[in-house]
Amino acid sequence: MTIQRMDNVGIVVADLRAAIAFFTELGMELEGEALVEGQWVGRVVGLDDVQVDIAMMRTPDGHSRLELMTFRTPAAVSTEPANAPANALGIRRIMFAVDDIDDVLARLRARGAELVGDLQQYEDSYRLCYIRGPEGIIVALAEQLS
């Protein structure tokens, strides 16, 4: 075997508080926060003078994590349009299974999330949608039907 598991997905954000609030509203739990700095982290990520605030978010089942990061130094850079479409190259979305997609949509819309397209039903299996959250992050929601 070459890997044991996928440990986490890292997302660089400008507003760490807003990202934590968004993913908490989605149902994730804040596992912890820390300032990470020093020569060792710079060597890992290939940057000089790194100071980064991180927040580790965990799904309720404990199997998946998001590492939200805000760089103090060096400053974060943008590599794509702020609202890149779903077909742009790179990591485009994170998908979450939810119990009640209508409830989750209402709560996230109250935090500024917007539908990318429409809420759709796939056969008798799923209700699905893409929403755009903080920093333009696309989050897919899927509610399994019966």
Image: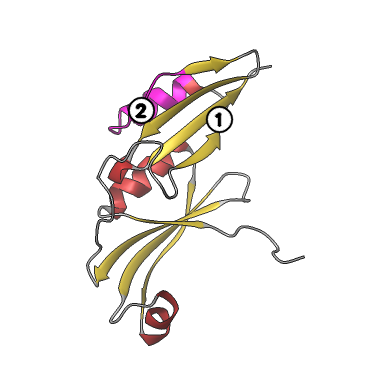
At a point 61% along the width and 57% down the height, the residue shown is 6
Mark 2: amino acid:
Val
Residue where numbered disc 2 is placed? 116
Q: Residue 130's spot in the image, x, y percent? A: 43, 30
At a point 38% along the width and 78% down the height, the residue shown is 46
At a point 67% along the width and 59% down the height, the residue shown is 5
Q: Residue 117's spot in the image, x, y percent? A: 38, 23
At a point 55% along the width and 28% down the height, the residue shown is 142
Q: Residue 8's spot in the image, x, y percent? A: 53, 57
Please tell me whether mark 1 sits on a helix, a strand or a loop. loop
**Which image quadrant for residue 139?**
top left
Q: Is residue 68 above or below residue 71?
A: above
Residue furthest to the top: 124
Residue 136 counted in the magenta span: no
Q: Is residue 140 above or below residue 51?
A: above
Residue furthest to the bottom: 39
Q: Which residues are magenta?
A: 102-119
- Between residue 134 and residue 118, name the one nearer to us: 118
Mark 2 Cα-neighbour bin, 10 Å: few <14, some 14–19, many ≥20: some
Residue where numbered disc 1 is placed? 98
Which corner quadrant holds the N terminus?
A: bottom right
Which corner quadrant holds the C terminus?
A: top right
Mark 1: amino acid:
Val
Numbered circle sitting on residue 57: none
Please tell me whether mark 2 sits on a helix, a strand or a loop. loop
User: For this view, does 146 lie left or right of residue 117?
Assistant: right
Q: Is residue 58 above or below residue 1?
A: above
Q: CA distance from mark 2 to mark 1?
A: 18 Å
User: For this view, does 36 lie left or right of residue 124?
Assistant: left
Give the mark count: 2
Residue furthest to the left: 75
Mark 1 Cα-neighbour bin, 10 Å: few <14, some 14–19, many ≥20: some
